Image (tube, grey):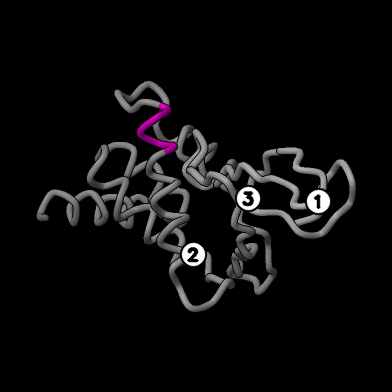
Amino acid sequence: MKCPYCDHEQTKVLDSRDAEDVEVTRRRRECEKCQKRFTTYERVELLDLHVIKKDGRKEKFSHDKLLHGLQKACVKLPVTHEQLADLVDKVERDLRRRASSEIPSAKVGELVLKRLKKLNEIAYIRFASVYRNFSDLDSFVAEVKKLQSE
């Protein structure tokens, strides 16, 4: 780490701790030449996730886009923004644990539906109706019956 005061390249770490955001580490450093102290923040740089759409296009995974879609599915339902944000965080964490950074949209949708079913069944049906693109009333009714039998 280069000293911001004298550009000397030798510094030592005096203190290291997680910052308010657990994904950031705060380090207190001291230059070995001028003895001035400074703070650095280190963050893990994650690879971008890409979603492979049904038509073969690749699109960067968007936390906000997924959250917005879930909010639409939960309009006028007793589901909080925090619950939805937590759901999206967990889905993203599951995706990042996969071997590949390219994930089929079907896998993303299934992960969301699995968690949404536990959160709110009406939101699950609403999201499934868009995600699974029900073509007629029979497919919608079949999904509701499947949900009732579980």
| Residue that mark 1 sits on | 33
Q: How far apart are marks 2 and 3 (CA)?
A: 20 Å
The CA distance from mark 3 to mark 1 is: 23 Å
Label 2: which residue? 96
Which segment is the magenta one?
Answer: 81-85
| Marks 1/2: CA–CA distance | 41 Å
Amino acid, disc 1: Lys
Q: Closer to the observer: label 2 or label 3?
A: 3
The answer to which quarter of the image holds residue 49 is: bottom right
Residue type pointed to by label 3 = Glu
Decide which of 123, 88 is in the foreground and name it. Answer: 88
Q: Is the magenta stretch mostly helix, strand or loop?
A: helix
Q: How crowded is mark 2: few (under 14 residues within 10 Å), some or many (20 or more)?
A: some
Verify CB contact (< 8 Å) between mark 2 and mark 3. no
Number of numbered discs visible in the structure rendering: 3
Furthest toward the right, the residue is 6
Instruction: Tell me which numbered mark, 1 or 2, is placed earlier along the sequence.
Output: 1
